[in-house]
Image: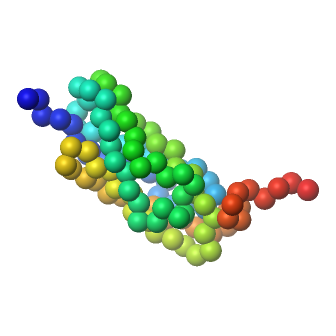
Amino acid sequence: MAVQPIPTGIIPHVMDVTGGQIVQCDLTLDKAAPTAQTVHLTTSRPDVFSGFPSLVTVPIGKNSLTIPLITRSVATITIVTITATCNGQSKTTSLTIKPGGPPPGGPTPIT
């Protein structure tokens, strides 16, 4: 049986973001996926994301995937952890979400 790929990192394109913005995270595996690889994602604060994905799939033959995460507005600086788990191995990163974005529930309407 072939050794399956494991995560080597989950890295946000920026380490801090204003709530309400999208942050891209690069998920990398140690080798190309011989079959589609399901990766489980968890976060310490699902409430500060809009629709945080619990599963993502790295396509066959690829070893990375960019994941867009939509943040929500926060009242205070909030540090969250994001963990990617695949084939029994995990990698964790942190992201700082700063106040100043649109109010909770979506962007401010233009009047």
Q: Quadrant of the C terminus?
A: bottom right
Q: Give residue 95's quadrant in the image.
A: bottom left
Residue shown at 35% from the left, 33% from the top: 58
Q: Position of residue 49 (x, y in %)?
A: 54, 58
Q: How many marks?
A: 0
Q: Quadrant of the N terminus?
A: top left
The reply, left or right, for residue 3 in relation to residue 17 is left
Residue 48 placed where, x, y %?
54, 63
Residue 64 visible, this orientation: no
Image coordinates for residue 59, horizontal then vertical, percent: 35, 28
Q: Is residue 66 above or below residue 61?
A: below
Identity of the residue furthest to the left in this view: 1
Percent x, y for residue 75? 62, 74
* Viewer-proximal residue among 53 and 18: 53
Q: Is residue 78 above or below residue 33?
A: below
Q: Residue furthest right?
A: 111
Residue found at x 54% / y 51%:
51
Task: Tell me which corner region of the image, top left, top right, bottom left or bottom right, holds residue 34.
Answer: top left
Identity of the residue drawn at 51% across and 44% down: 68
The answer to whether residue 92 shows anywhere in this view is yes
